[in-house]
Structure formats: C-alpha cells, structure tokens
C-alpha cells in the first residue's frame, strides 16, 4: 500500500512526498522490487531523488517540512504510530482498518481531537469506479430513496500476507477484508441497530459469514457475505446489488486463474425495463487511489472528508466486531451507539 499511495501522490495536485520512513534500508534506497499485492503494478526500482529517507519514526516526525504522515504499516502498528504523529502536530492519513481494537480506535480519535489535527482513514472502496457510480446514483435522488442492498467480498486464503490469521497483528478477513463493506454500508445506510450473522470460524476468527443488518428506518435492510475460501482458483470476488425505489444497481467481479473479469458488468435496471451499462472508464483500480489522494488534500485544506473521516472508520470497526459477536452467539444482537 505504501507503493500504491506513493504512485498516486505523484499525480495529485497540492501534495508532494517530502520524506519516507522505513526500517528496510533497501526500500529507503528505492529498491521496491520485493513489494507485492493483489492489484497494481509489481514492485520495481523507484527513483526517490529529492525525497528524504529516514530509518526511524522520530526522525520523520522531527522533519518540520512534513505536514501529513501516511501510515501504510501493518494494522497492529496503526494506532501507536498514528497517535505519535498526531501528537507531533502532523495530520494523519492511515490505511484501513483504523485499528485492531475499539480501545485503540478510541485513542486515535481522542489524539486527533486533542492535537486539533485531521485523522483520515484509507477506505478506498467508495472511490472504486463501481462503488463511486453507485454512490452518485443514490445521492442524486433521481431513482428514489435507498431501500436495501446485498454486498459480497470473498478471497482465497492470502498466503502472501504474514500473520493474516493473527488477531493481534492483522485480524483475519473480517478486519482486513470485510471492513471495506462495513464502511460502505455505514456510509450508505447509517449506523445499523441490529445485526445477525451465520457462518464459520477458523480458530477464534471468523472465516466465512453471511450477515443481515437492520436500521432505524424499518424499510431499509442490508446483507453482506464475506470471508475466505481455501481454493486459489478464484482469488478474489466482490460485488453488490443495491435496491432503490425506481432502480436496481448491480455488478459482480472476480479474478479466476489470475484473470480479472466481470461476471456481471455494472448495470442499472431502470423503471422502464431497460438494462443500462454506465461508462466507468478502464476500471483501473489505481484511479481510485488518485481520487482518494485528492480527497485527502481537500480534507486537509478545507472541510473534513465525509468518506475518509476517522469516526466513520471507527464505526466500521465497531460494526465488524458486532458481526463477530453475532456470529459467535448465533443470535441477533442490538448495536448501541
């Protein structure tokens, strides 16, 4: 994610990378060939000319030319590093999830409040073309109010993520994967009031589940499927079906044997019986990170982002833990806010 963010920043007006911190000397020199992930270009040799490189966090935080610290470290380090940066007077943009525990998420929000600095969390999903399209249609009000939705995000076991099943370091698919959909559901529908889940665990962590959400408006409902399968032939899939009073929005995307394909291309079924396919460009996910970077700049320069705000990410984490509790108890639970 550090490399993905770095590449996005090169094309973002109003933002310049002045310094980076890594304990890895090779990365500080620009040798990023060992970087890998499930999207974006492969790691390569990077020209870091004009960018200062630090081997300790203290050095980075002492740099008075750094206004914003982007935290793309493993999840278990998010809270402590973000809080130190906020206390040093820096704004913080931290990758999702905001933290691995609600207590740490609370500490991060309080640190930002006391420092009077922005705390932004990198929930990029609302900026992906299909999700941005859905948001725009919903927010336009052209097809009536939002009634409900079904959301899906499932991956094959990610062998390349160290400590994926360690609750103290990554948190498994609920916090590393599904938190995207928890955040998007919270963004669209508000805070759920009741949650019920069924599924299975791997040790103490949810492995695969189906969840139903209820909201203060009894006319609105949402469901979500998430987790991990153990067959690598389909390494990733996500999609949604969103119901409005006068339209249905849907898409389904998967990666099969290393090839990404639309199982169902983005489609709107309108009230006249038409199936309309929006033009979403080339679908390159890197565009979402550029849009997200621009949103970070707007938030620092003006009003806080309605998408990247720390409180919204805090709510998404709380929703995930409520899902876990409902799955463990196999009972519908009330979510008090």
Image (tube, rainbow, N blue to C red):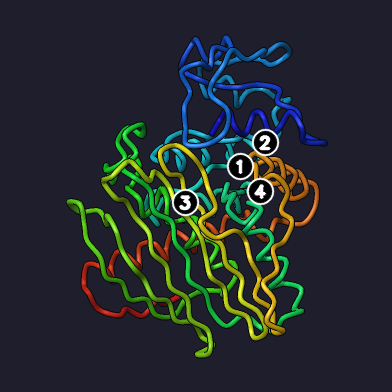
For the residues carrying marks 4 and 3, which lies nearer the camera in this image? 4
Q: Are there few (<14), some (14-19), or many (20+) residues within 10 Å of tag 4?
A: many
Label 2 close to label 1 by CB (< 8 Å):
yes
Position of 22 relative to 99 (above/below): above
| Mark 4: secondary structure | loop
Q: Label 4 belongs to which residue?
A: 118
In terms of image quadrants, where is residue 227?
Answer: bottom left
Q: Label 2 belongs to which residue?
A: 68
Q: Are there few (<14), some (14-19), or many (20+) residues within 10 Å of tag 2?
A: many
Q: Label 1 belongs to which residue?
A: 93
Label 3 close to label 1 by CB (< 8 Å):
no
Q: Label 3 belongs to which residue?
A: 107
> What residue lies at 74% left-to-right and 56% top-to-bottom?
279
Earlier residue among tags 1 and 4: 1
Q: Is residue 233 left or right of residue 93?
A: left
Earlier residue among tags 2 and 1: 2
């Amino acid at each position: 994610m550090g490399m993905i963010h770095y590449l996005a920043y090169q094309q973002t007006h109003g933002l310049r990378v002045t310094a980076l911190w890594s304990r890895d000397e090779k990365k500080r020199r620009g040798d990023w060939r060992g970087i890998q992930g499930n999207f974006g270009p492969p790691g390569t040799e990077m020209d870091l000319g004009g960018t200062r490189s630090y081997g300790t966090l203290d050095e980075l935080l002492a740099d008075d030319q750094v206004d914003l610290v982007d935290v793309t470290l493993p999840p278990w380090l998010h809270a402590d590093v973000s809080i130190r940066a906020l206390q040093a007077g820096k704004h913080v943009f931290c990758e999702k999830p905001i933290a691995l525990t609600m207590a740490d998420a609370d500490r991060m929000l309080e640190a930002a409040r006391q420092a009077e600095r922005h705390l932004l969390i990198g929930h990029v999903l609302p900026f992906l073309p299909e999700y941005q399209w859905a948001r725009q249609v919903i927010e336009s009000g052209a097809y009536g109010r939002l009634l409900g939705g079904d959301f899906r995000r499932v991956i094959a076991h990610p062998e390349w993520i160290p400590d994926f099943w360690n609750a103290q370091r990554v948190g498994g698919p609920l916090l590393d994967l599904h938190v995207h959909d928890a955040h998007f559901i919270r963004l669209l529908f508000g805070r759920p009031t009741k949650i019920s889940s069924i599924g299975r665990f791997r040790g103490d962590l949810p492995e695969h589940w189906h969840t139903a959400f209820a909201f203060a408006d009894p006319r609105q409902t949402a469901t979500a499927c998430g987790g991990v399968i153990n067959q690598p032939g389909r390494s990733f899939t996500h999609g949604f079906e969103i119901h409005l009073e006068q339209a249905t929005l849907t898409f389904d995307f998967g990666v099969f044997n290393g090839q990404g394909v639309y199982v169902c291309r983005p489609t709107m079924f309108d009230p006249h019986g038409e199936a309309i396919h929006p033009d979403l460009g080339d679908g390159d996910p890197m565009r979402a990170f550029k849009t997200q970077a621009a949103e970070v700049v707007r938030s620092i320069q003006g009003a806080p982002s309605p998408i990247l705000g720390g409180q919204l990410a805090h709510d998404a984490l709380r929703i995930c833990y409520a899902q876990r509790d409902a799955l463990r108890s196999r009972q519908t639970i009330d979510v008090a806010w």
